[in-house]
């Protein structure tokens, strides 16, 4: 690898935040391919540690327990010195105030945003979304976005609207932005 290539590939992690259905896992896999970085999904990490699905953790132990697990997952990544990874977070992970500086310490934080219609369409394909098992998922999404969007904005280095963008375009845009960020930080 020559010096020019070394300087253009981010050495730190790229962290993806945003509402469920915003594309964190899908775009994370694409970024991972582009950079040859492994993808860490914090929800999967928690499921492996707890030996239960996210939905089961919510129903058996509650949301508060799950949020504590999210903090522990981020703290573990930091203590292990994880670098050169794509990290897809659960949609609520940044809501806990103590997680926000930890995310920024881990690397370059990208907020993947999508409009309500897109989120509703994407999340309706999956019944493993405990917070959306309500009478009116659209209303739930709108209320949650109202609570979360300012926090996503606060924690992120880059805000990217994903509605209407394809996965490859989005991943390339994030990569270019991350290269610039890491080259100037």
Image (cartoon, helix red, strand yellow):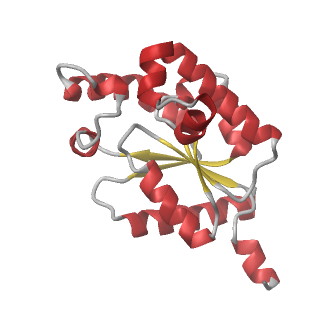
Q: How many marks?
A: 0
Relative side of 140 to 69, left or right: left
Q: Residue at x 56, y 31 (%)?
A: 51
Could one spot residue 96 in this view of the protein? Answer: no
Q: Which residue is situated farthest in the front direction here?
A: 51
Q: Is residue 156 left or right of residue 115?
A: right
Is the residue 164 above or below the residue 159 in the image? Answer: below
Give residue 13's quadrant in the image: bottom right
Looking at the rendered image, the quarter that the C terminus falls into is bottom right
Residue 28 rendering spot, x and y as whole percentages:
51, 56
Q: Residue at x 33, y 62 (%)?
A: 165
Quadrant of the image containing the N terminus: bottom right
Question: Quick check: 109 above or below 71?
Answer: below
Residue at the outermost bottom position: 2
Residue 61 image offset from top left, x and y in percent = 51, 14
Image height of 65 relative to 175, above or below: above
Is 179 positioned to the left or the right of 174 in the image? right
Q: Is residue 3 above or below residue 7?
A: below
Q: Residue at x 40, y 22 (%)?
A: 147
Quick one: 54 or 20, which is closer to the camera?
54
Residue appearing at x 46%, y 49% in the figure: 24
Residue 30 in sight: yes
Q: Quadrant of residue 100?
A: top right
């Amino acid at each position: 690898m020559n010096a020019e290539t070394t300087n253009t590939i981010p050495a730190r992690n790229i962290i993806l935040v945003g509402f469920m259905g915003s594309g964190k896992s899908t775009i994370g896999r694409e970024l991972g391919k582009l950079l040859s970085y492994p993808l860490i999904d914090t929800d999967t990490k928690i499921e492996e540690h707890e030996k239960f699905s996210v939905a089961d953790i919510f129903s058996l132990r509650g949301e508060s327990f799950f949020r504590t697990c999210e903090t522990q997952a981020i703290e573990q990544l930091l203590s292990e010195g994880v670098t050169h990874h794509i990290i897809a977070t659960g949609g609520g992970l940044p809501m806990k105030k103590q997680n926000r500086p930890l995310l920024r310490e881990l690397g370059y934080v990208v907020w993947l945003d999508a409009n309500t219609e897109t989120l509703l369409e994407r999340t309706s394909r999956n019944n493993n979304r405990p917070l959306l098992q309500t009478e009116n998922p659209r209303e739930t999404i709108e209320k949650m976005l109202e609570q979360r969007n300012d926090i996503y904005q606060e924690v992120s280095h880059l805000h990217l609207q994903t509605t209407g963008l394809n996965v490859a375009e989005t991943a390339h845009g994030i990569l270019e932005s991350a290269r610039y960020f890491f080259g100037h930080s």
